[in-house]
Image (cartoon, rainbow, N blue to C red):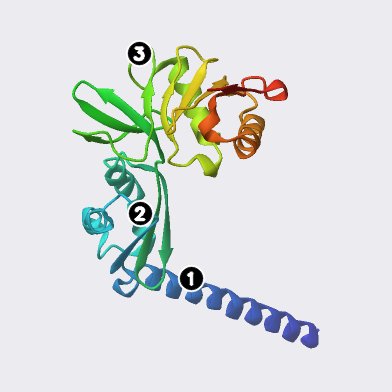
Protein backbone atom coordinates (compact mmCIF):
# COMPACT_ATOMS: atom_id res chain seq x y z
CA UNK A 1 0.00 0.00 0.00
CA UNK A 2 2.81 2.40 0.93
CA UNK A 3 4.65 1.50 -2.28
CA UNK A 4 1.53 2.34 -4.33
CA UNK A 5 1.14 5.64 -2.49
CA UNK A 6 4.76 6.60 -3.18
CA UNK A 7 4.33 5.81 -6.88
CA UNK A 8 1.17 7.89 -7.03
CA UNK A 9 2.91 10.80 -5.34
CA UNK A 10 5.82 10.57 -7.80
CA UNK A 11 3.40 10.58 -10.74
CA UNK A 12 1.59 13.62 -9.34
CA UNK A 13 4.89 15.38 -8.72
CA UNK A 14 6.07 14.62 -12.26
CA UNK A 15 2.78 15.87 -13.68
CA UNK A 16 3.05 19.08 -11.65
CA UNK A 17 6.63 19.65 -12.78
CA UNK A 18 5.69 19.13 -16.45
CA UNK A 19 2.65 21.39 -16.14
CA UNK A 20 4.69 24.05 -14.38
CA UNK A 21 7.38 23.88 -17.04
CA UNK A 22 4.81 24.30 -19.80
CA UNK A 23 3.24 27.28 -18.05
CA UNK A 24 6.66 28.85 -17.52
CA UNK A 25 7.56 28.26 -21.17
CA UNK A 26 4.30 29.85 -22.30
CA UNK A 27 4.97 32.87 -20.10
CA UNK A 28 8.51 33.23 -21.44
CA UNK A 29 7.29 32.97 -25.05
CA UNK A 30 4.51 35.48 -24.45
CA UNK A 31 6.84 37.95 -22.75
CA UNK A 32 9.38 37.58 -25.54
CA UNK A 33 6.74 37.96 -28.25
CA UNK A 34 5.35 41.17 -26.81
CA UNK A 35 8.69 42.52 -25.64
CA UNK A 36 10.20 45.67 -27.17
CA UNK A 37 13.10 43.42 -28.10
CA UNK A 38 10.78 41.72 -30.62
CA UNK A 39 9.30 44.94 -31.98
CA UNK A 40 9.57 46.14 -35.58
CA UNK A 41 12.73 48.17 -36.10
CA UNK A 42 13.29 47.48 -39.79
CA UNK A 43 10.83 47.35 -42.70
CA UNK A 44 12.19 45.54 -45.75
CA UNK A 45 10.47 46.01 -49.12
CA UNK A 46 11.07 43.45 -51.89
CA UNK A 47 9.80 43.01 -55.45
CA UNK A 48 9.67 46.67 -56.48
CA UNK A 49 10.78 48.01 -59.84
CA UNK A 50 8.58 51.00 -60.65
CA UNK A 51 7.46 51.67 -57.10
CA UNK A 52 9.64 53.83 -54.87
CA UNK A 53 10.55 51.32 -52.16
CA UNK A 54 11.75 54.05 -49.81
CA UNK A 55 8.45 55.92 -50.10
CA UNK A 56 6.52 52.72 -49.43
CA UNK A 57 8.70 51.97 -46.42
CA UNK A 58 8.11 55.48 -45.07
CA UNK A 59 4.35 55.12 -45.49
CA UNK A 60 4.47 52.04 -43.25
CA UNK A 61 6.52 53.73 -40.54
CA UNK A 62 3.62 53.64 -38.06
CA UNK A 63 4.43 49.93 -37.63
CA UNK A 64 7.87 50.77 -36.22
CA UNK A 65 7.95 49.88 -32.54
CA UNK A 66 4.99 47.51 -32.79
CA UNK A 67 5.69 43.95 -31.55
CA UNK A 68 6.01 41.58 -34.52
CA UNK A 69 3.02 39.59 -33.30
CA UNK A 70 0.86 42.73 -33.19
CA UNK A 71 1.63 44.19 -36.62
CA UNK A 72 -1.60 45.76 -37.89
CA UNK A 73 -2.10 43.84 -41.12
CA UNK A 74 -5.27 45.74 -41.97
CA UNK A 75 -3.42 49.06 -41.66
CA UNK A 76 -0.63 47.73 -43.88
CA UNK A 77 -3.24 46.63 -46.42
CA UNK A 78 -4.83 50.09 -46.39
CA UNK A 79 -1.47 51.70 -47.13
CA UNK A 80 -0.67 49.27 -49.94
CA UNK A 81 -4.14 49.81 -51.38
CA UNK A 82 -3.04 53.35 -52.14
CA UNK A 83 -0.46 52.04 -54.60
CA UNK A 84 -2.35 51.06 -57.78
CA UNK A 85 0.84 49.60 -59.23
CA UNK A 86 0.81 46.83 -56.61
CA UNK A 87 -1.14 43.79 -57.78
CA UNK A 88 -0.60 41.67 -54.66
CA UNK A 89 1.58 41.50 -51.57
CA UNK A 90 2.51 39.29 -48.64
CA UNK A 91 3.83 40.00 -45.15
CA UNK A 92 6.46 38.10 -43.24
CA UNK A 93 7.86 38.77 -39.79
CA UNK A 94 11.51 37.91 -39.37
CA UNK A 95 12.65 37.89 -35.73
CA UNK A 96 13.94 39.67 -33.92
CA UNK A 97 12.79 42.93 -35.50
CA UNK A 98 12.15 42.87 -39.26
CA UNK A 99 8.86 43.19 -41.13
CA UNK A 100 9.23 42.01 -44.74
CA UNK A 101 6.74 43.30 -47.32
CA UNK A 102 6.96 41.39 -50.61
CA UNK A 103 5.05 43.01 -53.46
CA UNK A 104 4.12 41.90 -56.96
CA UNK A 105 3.80 44.84 -59.32
CA UNK A 106 1.28 45.01 -62.14
CA UNK A 107 2.66 44.18 -65.57
CA UNK A 108 1.96 46.80 -68.26
CA UNK A 109 0.55 45.45 -71.53
CA UNK A 110 -0.07 48.57 -73.58
CA UNK A 111 -1.05 52.21 -73.94
CA UNK A 112 -4.51 53.73 -74.31
CA UNK A 113 -4.93 57.31 -75.50
CA UNK A 114 -7.05 59.30 -73.06
CA UNK A 115 -7.76 62.68 -74.60
CA UNK A 116 -4.41 64.36 -75.05
CA UNK A 117 -2.72 62.05 -72.53
CA UNK A 118 -1.70 58.41 -72.53
CA UNK A 119 -2.52 55.72 -69.97
CA UNK A 120 -0.22 52.74 -69.48
CA UNK A 121 -2.48 49.86 -68.40
CA UNK A 122 -2.18 46.26 -67.26
CA UNK A 123 -4.26 43.31 -68.45
CA UNK A 124 -7.05 44.16 -65.98
CA UNK A 125 -7.27 47.69 -67.32
CA UNK A 126 -5.74 49.28 -64.23
CA UNK A 127 -3.92 52.50 -65.07
CA UNK A 128 -0.31 52.17 -64.01
CA UNK A 129 0.81 55.62 -65.06
CA UNK A 130 -0.37 58.56 -67.15
CA UNK A 131 1.91 60.73 -69.24
CA UNK A 132 1.84 63.44 -71.92
CA UNK A 133 3.54 61.16 -74.44
CA UNK A 134 3.07 57.48 -75.17
CA UNK A 135 5.56 55.41 -73.12
CA UNK A 136 8.13 53.78 -75.36
CA UNK A 137 8.27 50.02 -75.69
CA UNK A 138 4.54 49.34 -75.37
CA UNK A 139 1.92 48.91 -78.11
CA UNK A 140 -0.92 51.36 -78.54
CA UNK A 141 -4.29 49.72 -77.91
CA UNK A 142 -7.48 50.47 -79.81
CA UNK A 143 -10.92 49.24 -78.74
CA UNK A 144 -14.50 50.27 -79.60
CA UNK A 145 -14.91 51.97 -76.22
CA UNK A 146 -11.56 53.67 -76.47
CA UNK A 147 -10.80 52.43 -72.97
CA UNK A 148 -9.93 49.36 -70.96
CA UNK A 149 -13.44 47.92 -70.83
CA UNK A 150 -15.47 45.42 -72.78
CA UNK A 151 -14.85 42.09 -74.45
CA UNK A 152 -12.52 43.53 -77.08
CA UNK A 153 -10.08 44.93 -74.52
CA UNK A 154 -10.05 41.81 -72.38
CA UNK A 155 -9.43 39.64 -75.46
CA UNK A 156 -6.50 41.69 -76.72
CA UNK A 157 -5.06 41.84 -73.18
CA UNK A 158 -5.17 38.04 -72.94
CA UNK A 159 -3.42 37.78 -76.29
CA UNK A 160 -0.67 40.18 -75.23
CA UNK A 161 0.01 38.09 -72.13
CA UNK A 162 0.69 35.02 -74.27
CA UNK A 163 2.96 36.56 -76.90
CA UNK A 164 6.40 34.93 -77.18
CA UNK A 165 9.41 36.74 -75.76
CA UNK A 166 10.77 37.11 -79.29
CA UNK A 167 8.06 39.73 -79.93
CA UNK A 168 8.94 41.89 -76.92
CA UNK A 169 9.17 45.47 -78.15
CA UNK A 170 8.20 44.49 -81.70
CA UNK A 171 4.43 44.98 -81.43
CA UNK A 172 3.58 48.59 -82.29
CA UNK A 173 -0.21 48.44 -82.06
CA UNK A 174 -3.06 46.11 -81.17
CA UNK A 175 -6.68 46.55 -82.23
CA UNK A 176 -9.88 44.64 -81.59
CA UNK A 177 -13.52 45.44 -82.31
CA UNK A 178 -14.90 42.20 -80.85
CA UNK A 179 -13.54 39.36 -78.76
CA UNK A 180 -12.54 37.39 -81.86
CA UNK A 181 -10.70 39.78 -84.16
CA UNK A 182 -7.52 40.80 -82.36
CA UNK A 183 -4.99 42.22 -84.82
CA UNK A 184 -1.37 43.09 -84.10
CA UNK A 185 0.73 45.52 -86.11
CA UNK A 186 4.45 44.85 -85.85
CA UNK A 187 7.10 47.56 -85.85
CA UNK A 188 8.11 46.60 -89.42
CA UNK A 189 4.55 47.20 -90.61
CA UNK A 190 3.49 43.56 -90.93
CA UNK A 191 0.02 42.73 -89.63
CA UNK A 192 -0.73 39.65 -87.53
CA UNK A 193 -4.35 38.49 -87.69
CA UNK A 194 -4.67 36.68 -84.38
CA UNK A 195 -8.40 36.20 -84.00
CA UNK A 196 -9.63 35.39 -80.49
CA UNK A 197 -7.56 34.57 -77.41
CA UNK A 198 -8.38 30.85 -77.70
CA UNK A 199 -5.42 28.59 -78.57
CA UNK A 200 -3.07 31.55 -78.08
CA UNK A 201 -0.18 29.34 -77.01
CA UNK A 202 -0.44 27.35 -80.24
CA UNK A 203 -0.81 30.52 -82.30
CA UNK A 204 2.32 31.97 -80.71
CA UNK A 205 4.35 28.89 -81.66
CA UNK A 206 3.05 28.96 -85.24
CA UNK A 207 3.79 32.68 -85.56
CA UNK A 208 7.36 32.24 -84.35
CA UNK A 209 7.93 29.46 -86.89
CA UNK A 210 6.45 31.52 -89.73
CA UNK A 211 8.58 34.53 -88.85
CA UNK A 212 11.71 32.39 -88.65
CA UNK A 213 11.01 30.82 -92.04
CA UNK A 214 10.27 34.02 -93.98
CA UNK A 215 12.02 37.23 -94.94
CA UNK A 216 10.29 40.07 -93.01
CA UNK A 217 10.91 42.43 -95.93
CA UNK A 218 8.69 40.24 -98.12
CA UNK A 219 5.82 39.70 -95.66
CA UNK A 220 2.78 41.96 -95.29
CA UNK A 221 0.74 39.76 -92.97
CA UNK A 222 0.57 36.59 -90.90
CA UNK A 223 -2.83 35.02 -90.33
CA UNK A 224 -2.69 32.64 -87.38
CA UNK A 225 -6.37 32.87 -86.45
CA UNK A 226 -6.61 29.22 -87.52
CA UNK A 227 -3.18 27.97 -86.41
CA UNK A 228 -3.52 24.66 -88.23
CA UNK A 229 -3.97 26.53 -91.52
CA UNK A 230 -1.88 29.67 -91.06
CA UNK A 231 -1.36 31.96 -94.05
CA UNK A 232 1.47 34.34 -94.92
CA UNK A 233 0.65 37.38 -97.05
CA UNK A 234 3.39 38.66 -99.34
CA UNK A 235 4.13 42.29 -100.07
The reply, left or right, for residue 135 in relation to residue 215 is left
- Which residue matches tag 2? 48
- Which residue matches tag 1? 26
Mark number, residue 145: 3
Q: Upstream in the sequence, badge 1 or badge 3? A: 1
- Using the rendered view, name the quadrant where residue 215 is placed: top right
The reply, left or right, for residue 88 in relation to residue 211 is left
SS of the residue under disc 3? loop
* On screen, residue 194 above or below 110: above
Per the model, the C-alpha gap separating discs 1 and 3 is: 61 Å
Q: Position of residue 151 (x, y in %)?
A: 47, 16
Task: Report if the CB atoms under discs 3 and 2 are less than 8 Å apart.
Answer: no
Q: Nearer the viewer, residue 155 or 26?
A: 155
Q: Nearer the viewer, residue 130 or 137?
A: 137
* On screen, residue 218 above or below 48: above
Q: Position of residue 79 (x, y in %)?
A: 27, 46
Per the model, the C-alpha gap separating discs 3 and 2 is: 32 Å
* Residue at 47% in and 22% down: 154
Q: Upstream in the sequence, badge 2 or badge 1? A: 1
* On screen, residue 101 above or below 3: above
Q: Upstream in the sequence, badge 3 or badge 2? A: 2
Crowdedness of circle 3 by 10 Å Cα count: few (<14), some, many (20+)? few
* Residue at 38% in and 12% down: 144
Amino acid sequence: MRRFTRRARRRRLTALVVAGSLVLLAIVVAVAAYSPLMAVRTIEITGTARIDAVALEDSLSDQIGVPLTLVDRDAVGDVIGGYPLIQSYSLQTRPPSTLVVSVVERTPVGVLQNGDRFDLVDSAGVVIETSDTAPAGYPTLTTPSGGATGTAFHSLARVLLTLPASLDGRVAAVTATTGDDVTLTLSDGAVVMWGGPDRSAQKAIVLEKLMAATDPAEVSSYDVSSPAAAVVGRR
